[in-house]
Image (cartoon, grey):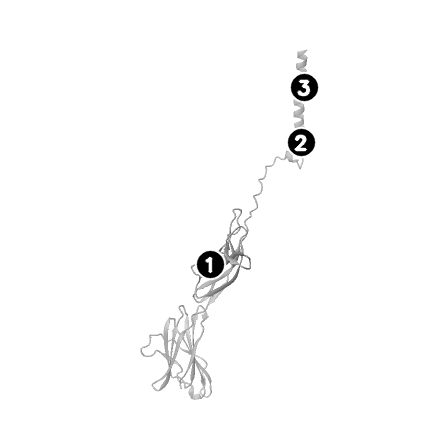
Amino acid sequence: MRRLLAAGIALTVSAGLMAAVGGTALARPNCDVPVPPPACDDSPTEPPPPPVGTDKYPMGWLESWQYVGGAVRVTGWASDPNGGPVQISVIADAPSVGTRPANLWHAGRGAYVGFDITVPTSALAGLHGFCVTANNVPDGSQPVPEVAPLSCPQYRVEPAAPSGLILTPGYHEGKRTLDVTFTDNSVREADYRIELSWLQTTPDDTPTDPGLPTTPPGGPSLPIPQPTYGAPIPTTEVGVARAIIYGTTGTGQRTWHFTHMPQAFVHVVVVSHEAGLTSAALSGGVSTR
């Protein structure tokens, strides 16, 4: 009897194992269909996407700027949703960088996000530029660009105008003369120009040698450029006559001595040329009658 029970139990266990193996064999073909169910997908699992960064771009505005005497002053506001105060940088073409926090009270924004910064910049004649940027305040997540440009204005510095004009009429060997003295203030000029003009009221006012420049006795040793003149005035007509000369570079007092001047009221204009620009005019007039 015991042998019969043992044999029955063995047959039952063997049948169960065969059924289990058969079930697995029957389940696998279901995983070979074109779109297997998730439980049968043998492809590698893709990693989850990285978290989206929360770092925000700084905001701001350059509201005003002004260049005065070798320095530029900028005002405006800047803020960052991730914190603050935002650092403002002013980068000019001079070797200087100014960085200040935007932590002043700004009435329009109703918060301490304003800035008012003055930095030295180039004072040389010509066209110059500078840029104002707001530095990002990071929050530790995926960063945005480090700086946000607010504005990059340009300003122009005019050449320094001549000053101290002195006009001295006189006579030399029976001829009318005129000394033109002025101070040349330009430091990088290409040249300067002196223009003399007068109204001829009679044909005899036309000089035989108009405005030949020489240096006065005891005066500075100056190179004498070849003078150029406007259209000559015929001796039978009246009108405006001009004499123009171009002087070489230099800074300091300059004196030109003009001989054979006409008998007239002479108007004198002096300008400097620097960096492709013309300075404000220094002008005056004197009678040589």
Quarter occupied by the N terminus: top right
Q: Contact (CB < 8 A) between labels 2 and 1?
A: no
Q: Disc 2 versus disc 3: distance between alpha carbons?
A: 27 Å
Which disc number belongs to residue 80?
Answer: none
Report crowding for label 2: few under 14, some 14 to 19, many 20 or more residues within 10 A (C-alpha). few
| Residue that badge 1 annotates | 91
Q: Disc 2 versus disc 1: distance between alpha carbons?
A: 71 Å
Q: Is residue 245 left or right of residue 38?
A: left
| Residue that badge 2 annotates | 29
Three-letter amino acid code at the position of disc 2: Pro
How far from the left and from the top, in percent, is residue 79? 53, 54
Q: Nearer the viewer, mark 2 or mark 3?
A: 3
| Residue that badge 3 annotates | 12
Q: Is residue 134 left or right of residue 172?
A: right
Q: Earlier in the sequence, mark 2 or mark 3?
A: 3
How far from the left and from the top, in percent, is residue 25? 66, 28
Three-letter amino acid code at the position of disc 3: Thr
Query: Which of these two is toward me, 259 or 75?
Result: 75
How far from the left and from the top, in percent, is residue 151? 52, 60
Q: Disc 3 versus disc 1: distance between alpha carbons?
A: 90 Å
